[in-house]
């Protein structure tokens, strides 16, 4: 049967093949959609591995050992998007293939802290900290999915469903004035292999990592991943699955991905020419969409203009949200630990820009309700801290803010320094171009989690 050029054009992207003399069609569009879904599904897992290796390259993390940050990140920091300047990090990437790891948490003497542990898919598995265990000392045993040993007496097990895990510990800090005190506390947090704790020889396990393309020190992991080709992404994804299996509820999605030919037993894609065509189209489109995450954000509901993730840290089968959170804020906490309202546009829907001056007004009875503390951080269009003469990247209740006579609070977000001294105390410097704001609410009160409290709409300054 002959198909003319006009007919082929009318079919759009529907591929046509002849099989045994009969006409069969294969939907290239469907293959493109399935590839896009496969990318979103696997994106957090691959980004976790890339981030781990990038941080090892920079010397900011260790495997099964703490790397403590000694100061807040600044505008040169690009290892993780949306970094905070409220806490000093204590970071560790767990590799649980060899054996479990003993984690000893000291008495923190009233210091607020949190030690959330994410599995390889960015779900928060456990979050030891002030909110969950108070400030007393406690020992944990972090174990992988296949370990069957006996937990030593006095230890609480934390079972991770994947062999790779990431703990982004945070201890509240007021900045340089209390760095020394926090540094001393950091040193009292301990990690060691179970064999070392028991005084035995270390277990033997593979020490190799998944081989990635050459990493760039000065380029963030998400930006590097956006430059990968389809074969590299899905080969890496496939290799990581062996030690980091998805959950039972992910089985239907995994079956769909295998049907695309992108996942095979030997991690070498096996696709027909039409499958390759559809996958190429879908991959290019979804990478561009996720890289331009603003488009995806624009489709999400807002509250007074703010986008609020009430269901972070545990994503179930919400794969697109999980990928978007990984792209914009890898390492997001559970809402019980912290809520992150973020703002990208003004009340009229126009992108926030340094060309304008803004005011964020909190009435006295509408100040952020938290049990720990709150802060407002500004990020540039690349989701990193924005350089400014004051090196001021955030404002919060720990700062020497000026409150109005009626107890309300005005924060000024603009490029140029305000003329009034009181306004300068409440000034968050903005860049020339686009920017966005993250309002961090640590240990939020129930009215935040129940959506009875919302951050106010931002206003253009008069």
Image (cartoon, rainbow, N blue to C red):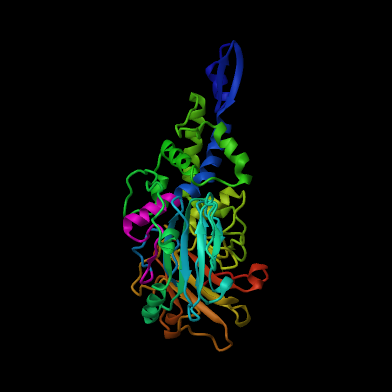
- Front residue of 461/61: it is 61
Q: Is residue 61 left or right of residue 265?
A: left
Question: Where's residue 386, x and y in %?
Answer: 39, 65
Residue 230 picture quarter: top left
Q: Can residue 453 be seen in this view?
A: no
Question: Where's residue 241, x and y in %?
Answer: 50, 43
Picture layout, residue 325 above or below residue 113: above
Does 65 lie within the magenta span? yes
- Front residue of 454/316: it is 316
Residue at the image point whose x is 51% and y is 62% from the top: 141
Picture layout, residue 289 above or below residue 26: below
Q: Is residue 88 visible?
A: yes
Does 122 lie within the magenta span? no
Picture layout, residue 412 above or below residue 236: below
- Front residue of 200/204: it is 200
The magenta region covers 48-72
Q: In this view, does 297 lie to the left or right of 168?
A: right
Residue furthest bottom as drawn: 405
Residue at the image point whose x is 49% and y is 42% from the top: 242
- Front residue of 9/378: it is 378
Q: Quadrant of the N terminus?
A: top right
Question: Where's residue 336, x and y in %?
Answer: 60, 67
**Tally of numbered tags:** 0
Picture layout, residue 222 above or below residue 191: above
Question: Where's residue 128, x and y in %?
Answer: 54, 68
């Amino acid at each position: 049967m002959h198909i003319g050029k006009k007919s082929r054009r009318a079919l759009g992207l529907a591929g046509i093949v002849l099989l045994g003399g009969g006409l069969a069609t294969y939907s290239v569009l469907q293959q493109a959609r399935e590839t896009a879904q496969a990318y979103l599904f696997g994106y957090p897992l691959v980004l976790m591995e890339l981030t781990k290796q990038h941080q090892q390259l920079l010397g900011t993390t260790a495997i099964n050992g703490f790397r403590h940050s000694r100061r807040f990140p600044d505008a040169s920091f690009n290892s993780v998007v949306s970094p905070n300047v409220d806490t000093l990090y204590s970071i560790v990437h767990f590799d649980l293939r060899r054996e479990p790891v003993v984690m000893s948490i000291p008495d923190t003497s009233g210091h607020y802290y949190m030690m959330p542990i994410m599995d390889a898919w960015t779900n928060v598995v456990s979050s030891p900290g002030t909110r969950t265990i108070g400030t007393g000392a406690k020992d944990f045993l972090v174990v992988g999915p296949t370990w069957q040993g006996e937990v030593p007496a006095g230890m609480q097990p934390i079972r991770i469903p994947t062999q790779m895990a990431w703990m982004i510990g945070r201890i509240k800090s007021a900045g340089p004035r209390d760095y020394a005190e926090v540094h001393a506390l950091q040193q009292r947090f301990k990690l060691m292999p179970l064999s070392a704790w028991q005084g035995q020889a270390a277990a033997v396990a593979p020490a190799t990592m998944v081989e990635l393309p050459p990493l760039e020190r000065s380029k963030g992991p998400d930006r590097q991943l956006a430059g990968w080709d389809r074969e590299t992404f899905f080969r890496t994804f496939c290799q990581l699955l062996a030690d980091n299996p998805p959950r039972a509820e992910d089985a239907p999605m995994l079956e769909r991905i295998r049907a695309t030919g992108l996942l095979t037993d030997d991690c070498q894609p096996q696709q027909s020419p039409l499958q390759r065509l559809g996958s190429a189209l879908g991959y290019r489109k979804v990478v561009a969409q996720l890289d331009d995450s603003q488009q995806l954000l624009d489709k999400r509901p807002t509250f007074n203009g703010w986008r609020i993730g009430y269901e972070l840290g545990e994503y179930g089968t919400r794969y697109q949200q999980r990928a978007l959170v990984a792209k914009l804020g890898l390492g997001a906490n559970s809402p019980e630990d912290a809520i992150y309202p973020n703002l990208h546009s003004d009340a009229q829907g126009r992108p926030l820009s340094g060309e304008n001056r803004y005011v964020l007004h909190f009435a006295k009875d509408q100040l952020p309700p938290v049990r720990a503390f709150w802060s407002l951080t500004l990020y540039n269009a690349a989701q990193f801290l924005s350089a400014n003469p004051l090196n001021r990247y955030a404002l919060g209740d720990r700062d020497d803010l000026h409150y109005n006579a009626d107890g309300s609070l005005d924060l000024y977000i603009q490029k140029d320094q305000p003329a009034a001294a009181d306004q300068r105390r409440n000034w968050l410097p903005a860049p020339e171009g686009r920017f966005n704001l993250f309002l961090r609410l640590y240990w939020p009160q129930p009215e935040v989690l129940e959506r009875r409290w919302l951050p106010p709409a931002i206003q253009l300054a008069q």
